[in-house]
Amino acid sequence: MKIKDYQCPYCGSLVQVYKANEWVLVCPDCGAQSNKLPRKVVELFLNEREREHVPEMLRRVADAPLTAFEVANKPHFTEISNWLLNGMCGSSSKAMASCFMRLPPTNKSYPRDPDDFNRCLHFFEWVPEARKEIDKLREISSMWNVFVDYWAELEKSFTDEVGHDWSKGRSAPKTYKLMQEIIAKGLEGVY
């Protein structure tokens, strides 16, 4: 069932949005096709009233000077949009998502405590391919540059101390101390 037309950014033809089992954007002339999109994400582009019911980042994507087709083809778009709609999101994990989707860096938040860091780890569970590009996070800020240098040590400290997703405990003082040391290095401009 055809829903709406957009102009293909590659060849200029009308891109038709179809609903099958999932929503798909397809160019009838050049054959360019988006990833399969979650229904709510496509509704974001089809229905203005949906905007108030989706996370801020997806509203930013929708307000960007891009067609829905271009947005749908951003790196990790499907996984990140699913995480935004269904996952555990925090300020620093949203900064990660913005970075991996190549959005303008308006949010430079970094993890400030173990709970915040846990949400960053959850982001990588939802978007596992992004973990391979962890160095990209250095582009966010000098503080993120320091965090990337210590990421493996920080993740090991967290999982050793409280397990995956707090499965072994409710408090992570060693991890918190390590995070404070990392933040101090970032603030001192050691990096």
Image: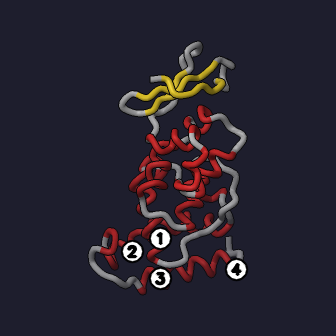
Residue located at (45% from left, 46% from top): 79
Mark 1 vs 4, N-terminal side: 1
Q: With 180 as the anchor, is 37 left or right in this view?
A: left
Residue 86 x %, y %: 41, 56
Mark-to-mark CA distance, 4 and 3:
18 Å
- Residue 106 image-quadrant placement: bottom right
Q: CA distance from mark 2 to mark 4?
A: 24 Å
Q: Residues within 10 Å of mark 4 (few under 14, many from 20)?
A: few
Of label 3 and label 2, which has the lower sequence position? 2
Using the numbered discs, state the Cα–Cα distance from disc 3 to disc 1 in whole angstroms: 10 Å
Return the residue at label 1: 117
Lower sequence index among marks 2 and 4: 2
Q: Nearer the viewer, mark 2 or mark 4?
A: 2
Q: CA distance from mark 3 to mark 2?
A: 9 Å
Q: Are marks 1 and 2 in contact (CB under 8 Å)?
A: yes
Q: Nearer the viewer, residue 136 or 72?
A: 72
Report the front residue among 64 and 146.
64
Disc 1, SS: helix
Mark 4 falls on what kind of element? helix
Foreground mark, 1 or 4, reads 1
Q: Are marks 1 and 4 in contact (CB under 8 Å)?
A: no
Left or right of 104 on screen, residue 79: left
Which residue is identified by label 2?
Answer: 158
Question: Label 4, on which residue?
Answer: 188
Tell me the quarter of the picture where residue 64 sits.
top right
Q: Nearer the viewer, residue 47 or 142?
A: 47
> Where residue 98 appears, x then y in whole percent?
60, 54
Give the left or right position of residue 81, taking residue 184 as reference.
Answer: left
The three-letter amino acid code for the residue at tag 3 is: Tyr
User: For the residue marked with disc 4, what is the amino acid?
Assistant: Glu
The residue indicated by pointer 3 is: 176
